[in-house]
């Protein structure tokens, strides 16, 4: 149904710190201040890709999924409603705040707000990274991928696979966990689902740089700040060379390079280890998902 995860929004009491963190560690450009308490961060010529709004708690606020244009927007709303999803057509004011042409929203079974849109504003030739770097892999692949912790994989797949049409890229079974990875375009995965009984949350957001040197430079910056959570390593499934860093707002960033693309003709693989090399936690244990809250699945099964 969707073309890509185009943008993602968080809330945080420390939103303002992203004005420094985004450029210095991640190489993102801070978009001009609109005076609305939202820090918008750019990765390419799109108006922005990541927003952090001042709020009382650290949280994932919304995921911004695109469709091809106005006709596809209407078709997607009709399809969602025909499947029993309650869709809200959002105001022109909120669409303008998100820098999109048209906006609608609905929620997943765990309460995560999904935003459907077309026409994320493009400002050609205006992207300047926050520090010297070669830029990010975006375009038709969107902002990157998001890993969500979900209390029940069957409920999650009924929504994301059966209703929204995400396709399984592969499953990693390692360290007593089975994590599934899903694509909606040529990015190996735009969505990962991490089953954690009784909990939901956002484990991390992945950004893909255009060169390995960009990853090394970001790694140095994260280490200088004491923010490094997981060392450099290469995942078995998407072959991403990446590290994981903390942020001012609880959500973790996976910062990587070199992923393979999804192949719609390929069957889903089961892979029985997580990493080819590296990805060692810097603390005592693999860090818990950045923003987690309990969720009751009893009603969902009823
Ligand atoms: Fe990831």
Image: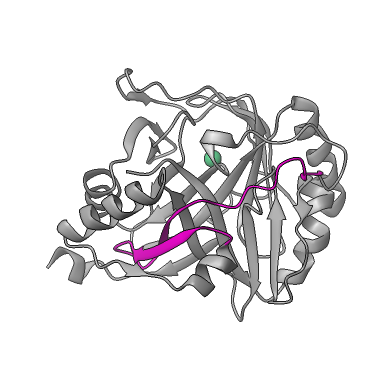
Res 290 visible: no
Residue at the image position 78 percent from the left and 67 percent from the top: 17
Where residue 10 appears, as percent x and y from the top left, is 58, 65
Q: Quadrant of residue 212?
A: top right
Pick out the residue farthest to the left: 302
Vertical comparison of 90 with 213: above or below: below
Where residue 138 appears, as percent x and y from the top left, is 60, 37
State left or right for residue 155 relative to residue 230: left
The residue segment tinted magenta is 99-128
Res 100 visible: yes
Pick out the residue farthest to the top: 265
Of the four image quadrants, the one with ligand 1 is top right
Residue at the image position 22 percent from the left and 50 percent from the top: 158
Along the line of sight, the residue nearer the viewer: 274 or 11:
11
Where residue 286 appears, as percent x and y from the top left, is 57, 47
Q: Does the magenta-highlighted stretch encompass residue 166?
A: no
Vertical comparison of 250 with 127: above or below: below
State left or right for residue 125 relative to residue 288: right
Q: Does the magenta-highlighted stretch encompass residue 103?
A: yes
Residue at the image position 53 percent from the left and 22 percent from the top: 260
Residue at the image position 79 percent from the left and 40 percent from the top: 218
Magenta: main secondary structure equals: loop
């Amino acid at each position: 149904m969707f073309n890509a995860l185009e943008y993602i929004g968080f809330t945080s009491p420390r939103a303002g710190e992203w004005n420094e963190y985004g450029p210095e560690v991640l190489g993102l450009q801070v978009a001009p201040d609109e005076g609305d308490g939202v820090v918008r961060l750019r990765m390419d010529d799109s108006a922005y890709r990541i927003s952090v709004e001042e709020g009382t708690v650290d949280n994932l606020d919304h995921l911004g999924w695109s469709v091809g244009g106005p006709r596809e927007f209407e078709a997607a709303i009709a399809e969602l409603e025909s499947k029993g999803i309650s869709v809200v057509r959002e105001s022109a004011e909120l669409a303008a705040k998100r820098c999109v042409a048209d906006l609608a929203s609905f929620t997943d079974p765990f309460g995560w707000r999904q935003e459907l849109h077309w026409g994320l504003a493009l400002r050609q030739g205006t992207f300047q990274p926050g520090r010297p770097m070669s830029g990010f892999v975006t375009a038709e692949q969107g902002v990157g991928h998001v890993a969500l912790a979900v209390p029940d994989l069957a409920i999650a797949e009924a929504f994301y696979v059966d209703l929204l049409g995400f396709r399984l890229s592969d499953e990693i079974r390692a360290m007593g966990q089975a994590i599934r990875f899903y694509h909606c375009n040529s990015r190996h995965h735009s969505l990962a689902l991490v089953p954690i009984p009784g909990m939901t949350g956002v484990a991390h957001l992945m950004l893909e740089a255009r060169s390995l040197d960009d990853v090394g430079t970001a790694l140095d910056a994260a280490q200088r700040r004491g923010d490094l959570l997981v060392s450099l390593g290469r995942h078995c499934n998407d072959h991403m060379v990446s590290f994981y860093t903390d942020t001012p707002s609880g959500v973790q960033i996976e910062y990587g390079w070199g992923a393979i693309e999804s192949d719609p003709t390929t069957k889903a693989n089961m892979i029985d280890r997580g990493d080819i090399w590296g990805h060692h936690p810097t603390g005592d244990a693999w860090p818990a998902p950045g923003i987690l809250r309990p969720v009751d699945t009893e009603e969902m099964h009823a």
